[in-house]
Image (cartoon, rainbow, N blue to C red):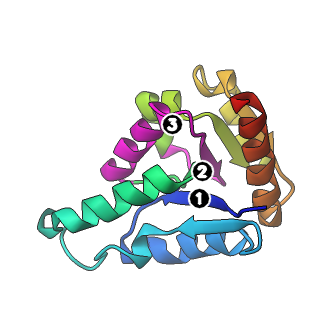
Amino acid sequence: MARIKVYLIARISEDAHLWNNKICSFLDKERFEVFNPQEHNPWNKKHESFSDKVFQTDLDAIKNSDMGLLLPEYGKDCAWECGWYSNSTKPCVAFVDTQFEWLRDWMVKGGIDYVVTNNQESFKILNQDPILKLREIKLISDFADIGNALNDIYEKYLEQSK
């Protein structure tokens, strides 16, 4: 079976690298191929100096992906990426630990298909959100279960696509 291609929707600034890498480390290379923009984009430059090649590289990776994985707290560019997925048939999944500032972004929440969390309190809050409570919210026991949750979501997506 081919690996599931995941486009990581996350901030690329240096302060986000550890979190992004931590989450990606739970997606085993046997099942997942992750496009992590911080590995391809010039994170140490001002965004206004990015060339069109940066945009095209990311857009190609999005188009070639099987799903998007959103990591709040994200930047403005990430909201655009979520919007791209919401206009496609590909699932957009948010992984939430204890991040809540993003819950003010109603358009992003509306474009998400699934939410995965490893935090019981977050699970309660997400299920009370007027938009997210209409999405499937998965509670996993710990970070190590992220890959299984994404795999289940992808298999469900494939089944619904038939």
**Label 3 SS:** helix
Q: Is residue 26 above or below residue 81?
A: below
- Residue at the location (68% across, 34% down)? 125
Q: Mark 3: which amino acid? A: Leu
Cα distance between the residues tagged 1 and 2: 6 Å
Q: Residues within 10 Å of mark 3 (few under 14, many from 20)?
A: some
Q: Are marks 1 and 2 in contact (CB under 8 Å)?
A: yes
To which residue does mark 2 refer? 66
Q: Mark 1: which amino acid? A: Val
**Circle nearer the N terminus (1, 3):** 1
Quick check: 116 left or right of 43?
right
Q: Residues within 10 Å of mark 1 (few under 14, many from 20)?
A: many
Instruction: Tell me, yes or no, whether the highlighted magenta stretch contains residue 48.
Output: no
Cα distance between the residues tagged 1 and 3: 23 Å
Q: Are marks 3 and 2 in contact (CB under 8 Å)?
A: no
Q: Quick check: can you spot residue 118?
A: no
Quick check: 128 left or right of 18?
right
**Which quadrant is home to the C terminus?**
top right
**Label 2 SS:** loop
Question: Which numbered dot is residue 103?
Answer: 3
To which residue does mark 1 refer? 6
Q: How many marks?
A: 3
